[in-house]
Amino acid sequence: MRIDGQPETLSLADLYAPIAADLQHARRLLADELISDHAFTSDLCRHVGQFHGKMLRPALLLLAAQAAGGVRPEHPVLAAVVELVHLATLVHDDVLDEADIRRRAATVNRLWGNQHAVLMGDFLYSHAFHLCSSLQSQYAARVVGQTAITMCEGEMMQVASRGNLALTEREYMDIIARKTAALVETCCHLGAQYAAADEATVRRLRDFGHALGLAFQIVDDLLDLTGQEAEVGKSLGRDVYEGELTLPVIHALRTASPGERTRLTTLLGQPDTTPLPPREGLAEGRTSTALTGARSASDPRRYRQIAALLRESDSLAYAESVARDHVETAKSALADLPPSPARDRLSAMADFVLARRQ
């Protein structure tokens, strides 16, 4: 997603240049964890291996480390840990969202069903904590464990709020702070902490990660409404189909005229009637509620209508402005760090998050 007025962003290769060797080390560690001597589990691991595309969270951890004093041997391990946690959340999220596509590939739940997807997510979480326990200090294990708890709380809050047209912006921000920003904050926290940074530097980088995580999720929610599936690389329109209110919808419901509000609530409450396509692995005549994710790709009309209404009401622009404000907050948290290529890359990463299209 490109937000007007933002500067051109660097490529990921440029952003990752200061930590390229350490990021490659983290990739090797991650690959070592995504293996199994059981053939079926090994197939699942190879499939999930496609999902760690941009490696944003490991890169943030390593850049934070370098900006705070330097990368140490623990950092590539921690980078692999946070990516394993992230992969686990993706697999579980696809079950919750009944999604079919992730990183332009079929989701685990689409190919093998919800049971295998849930177990695969658990497998990834287990590997994350197993790898984390290899460090001498258990500080990271406690932080990652608390972060996982917070993320689960955020997901449960989101599921519990489905269909709640009275959801407030404050409640939405609390949800995304837990389910998304918590892990981004932890990446920056651990990067600085294990670089032996002082308390003030750790706090600044945590603040950077928190604000950046909020912006990331707002942009993600906007892409779910306005993106192109071929470009974004995952099932779109899921928030609409699951009844999850995101920031532009909340803003429109609060500010729209009575007529616009009625039209929007009608669209939000409209039942899906798109025929469900056949699913691999299901016997003929069997039905599955996990198929509804296919509707977003096969019939995008309803969420496109909602997106048009949100654009007319300036609610998309409002959400973009909130995301931009959080990016500026993130960048301001870096101001007191010593000048360095890593600090500059962290600032550029914030612009990248704002301008991303996938």
Image (cartoon, rainbow, N blue to C red):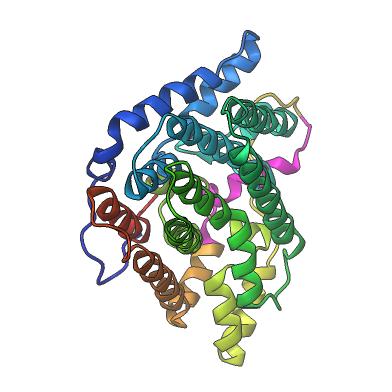
Question: Compared to 119, does 343 lie above or below?
Answer: below
Residue 167 position in % (x across, y down): 68, 75
Specify the segment rendered in magenta.
285-301
| Quarter placement of the N terminus | bottom left
Q: Quadrant of residue 179?
A: bottom right
Residue 296 position in % (x across, y down): 56, 51
Residue 22 position in % (x across, y down): 35, 31
The answer to whether residue 236 is left or right of residue 208 is right
| Closer to the camera in the image, 355 or 327 | 327
Name the residue at 62% across, 76% down: 170
Query: Is 274 a magenta residue?
Result: no
The answer to whether residue 108 is left or right of residue 325 is right
Name the residue at 61% across, 41% down: 139
Residue 197 visible from this viewpoint: yes
Question: Compared to 113, does 317 lie above or below?
Answer: below
The answer to whether residue 55 is left or right of residue 246 is left
Q: Which residue is the extreme one toward the bottom?
A: 257
Label tally: 0
Name the residue at 64% across, 14% down: 40
Question: Compared to 69, does 304 lie above or below?
Answer: below
| Closer to the camera in the image, 82 or 117 | 82
Query: Is 300 a magenta residue?
Result: yes
| Closer to the camera in the image, 211 or 288 | 211
Name the residue at 51% across, 39% down: 102
Residue 279 visible from this viewpoint: no
Residue 172 position in % (x across, y down): 62, 69
